[in-house]
Image (cartoon, grey):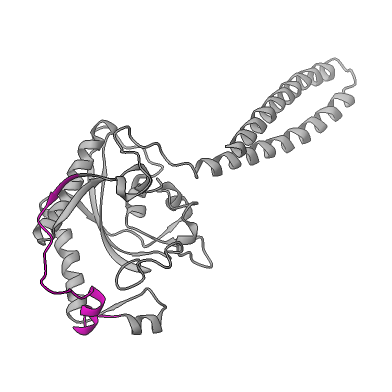
Amino acid sequence: FGEFRDADAARRRLLGEVEQLKARRNQASEEVGRRKRQGEPAEDLVREMREVGDRIKTLDQAVKDSEERIARFLLTVPNLPHASVPVGADAASNLEVRRWGEPRRFDFTPKPHWDIGEALGLVDFERASRMAQSRFAVLTGLGARLERALINFMLDLHTKEHGYTEVFPPLLVNAAAMTGTGQLPKFAEDSFKTHDESLYLIPTAEVPVTNLYREELLAPGTLPVSYVAYTPCFRREAGSYGKDTRGLIRVHQFNKVELVKFVEPVHSYEALEAMTRHAETVLQRLGLPYRTVVLCTGDMGFS
């Protein structure tokens, strides 16, 4: 926090000096006007005010630089977890809330999904790496059909049964949108950025959908609104090399169906529980056992 304290102290000191100089400039301007009206010389004050104006310009830029330093620092500080969040260093401290279904038990050693998928011709990693690089996949035949079916199933479920409005947002967004949802500056190295323009390939549909109302004021009675979006997502996974490198885990491109709700703060936890139930419905309809957990402080996302 030393950098923040230094920048804040500099800003306060500079603002104090600027305000004094501006007060002096106003006072001198009145004096110059009075002298001119009375036919008295005012060249000395005009010269002084020119120097004061140059100093104010320099100080205003210094204030702006200090404020930018403060803003950059604050973007590296996460929000405070709610008091109910369990404290812990990693996933071992997560708190299980409930579970649904029982994991299947096999009387043989099951094969990993990448072996089964390649054997059945559902996924091709080798050809994907030749046309792109590692951590990409080509879905073929029933593999591609299954992906499309899952996307449509989730979109139909959330729009027809859960009351969400479907949106299909841009797949590239500007830096302000990435900053608004916490991707920048912390996860800059995990993001794909275009070369000629400052646009980023979205790492999750959360980014464009959450930014739908950025810099807008919503009229009373507008909320709540619920959106569901399917998008491809793109991540460098720059900090994850050496773990989960096989198969369709931590790939650079994947598909995602995202849920976003805009609600008044008083209804935020009610909305969170509703979204959790809607996500659980997907797993239940597909017959996939799962656990619902509260993430501890050490396992939460940065934002």
Residue appearing at x 64%, y 35% in the figure: 6
Q: Is residue 163 visible?
A: no
Is residue 110 covered in magenta? yes
Is residue 245 covered in magenta? no
Tell whether 177 sits left or right of 83.
Answer: right
Relative vertical location of residue 42 with respect to residue 259 in this rendering, above or below: above
Tell whether 45 sits left or right of 7.
Answer: right
**Which one is nearer the viewer's eye here, 209 or 300?**
300
**Which one is nearer the viewer's eye here, 228 or 92?**
92
Residue appearing at x 63%, y 36% in the figure: 7
In the rendering, at what x and y percent does residue 17 appear?
72, 26
Question: From the image, which quarter does the N terminus lie in?
Answer: top right
Tell whether 44 sits left or right of 253.
Answer: right
Residue 12 image-quadrant placement: top right
In the rendering, at what x and y percent does residue 120 appear?
18, 83
Tell me which segment is drawn in magenta: 97-124
Residue 115 image-quadrant placement: bottom left
Relative vertical location of residue 160 with respect to residue 116 in this rendering, above or below: above
In the rendering, at what x and y percent does residue 160 appear?
11, 54
Q: Is residue 208 visible?
A: yes
Residue 245 image-quadrant placement: bottom left
Tell whether 102 sits left or right of 96.
Answer: left
Relative vertical location of residue 206 with respect to residue 297 in this rendering, above or below: below
